[in-house]
Amino acid sequence: MDQKIIEKAAGFISTNGLECVMAVIDFDGYPTASTISVSKNEGISSLSFCTSFDSIKVKRIQKCNYASVCISSSEPFFNITLVGKIEVITDPKIKKEMWYDGLEHYFTGYEDENYCVLKFVTERYKLFIDEDEVEGKF
C-alpha cells in the first residue's frame, strides 16, 4: 500500500505547472516559505525548479541547504510534504536540459547567467492521499 501511495504522489507532482511551497532557512535562522513551480521530478525522491540566480531564495540556499517542499490540493484532496536538501546548479548542460518554453519571459536563454536550476533531494516524506497517511525516509 505504501508504494501505491508513493506512486500516486509522484503522479500528482508530475502535473505540468504544479506550484508548491518551498521553505528554506533565512539569514536569521528562521524558515521562510515561497511558492515555486516544479519543473521536473523523479518520483518523490527529487524535484527540480528553474529560478533566478540573483534571487534571495538562492542566496539563502547557498548559506543553508536544508529545505522542505509542500504540495497540496483540495480537489483531489492530497498533501505531500518532503524534507531534504537543495542545491543550486549552474552547469550549462543541466540548464539546457531543464530549459522549457515560457522561461524566455524571464531569461535570454539557457546560457543566461541569471538562470539557474534548484535540485531538491528528498530525505524524508509524509504523504496524505486517499485518506491514507504514509511516512518514510530515503
Image (tube, helix red, strand yellow):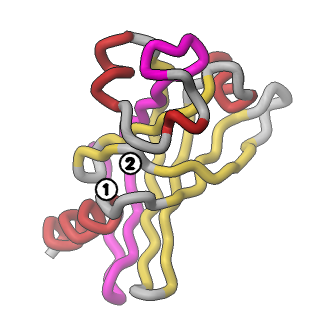
Q: Return the mark for residue 42.
A: none
Q: In this view, does 25 lie to the left or right of 71?
A: right
Q: In this view, does 87 lie to the left or right of 31?
A: left
Overall secondary structure of the magenta stretch?
A: strand
Q: In this view, does 6 lie to the left or right of 129?
A: left
- Span shown in magenta: 109-138
Give x and y (percent) for residue 28.
85, 29
From the viewer's side, name the closer residue of 68 and 50. Answer: 50
Please give the name of the residue rendered at 19% of the width and 69% of the height, measured from the top-left corner: 2
From the viewer's side, name the closer residue of 1 and 108. Answer: 108
Give the secondary structure at mark 1.
strand
State how many labels appear: 2
Q: Return the mark for residue 124.
A: 2
Give x and y (percent) for residue 58.
64, 25
Above or below for 11 versus 89: below
- Residue under label 1: 136
Above or below for 29 versus 22: above
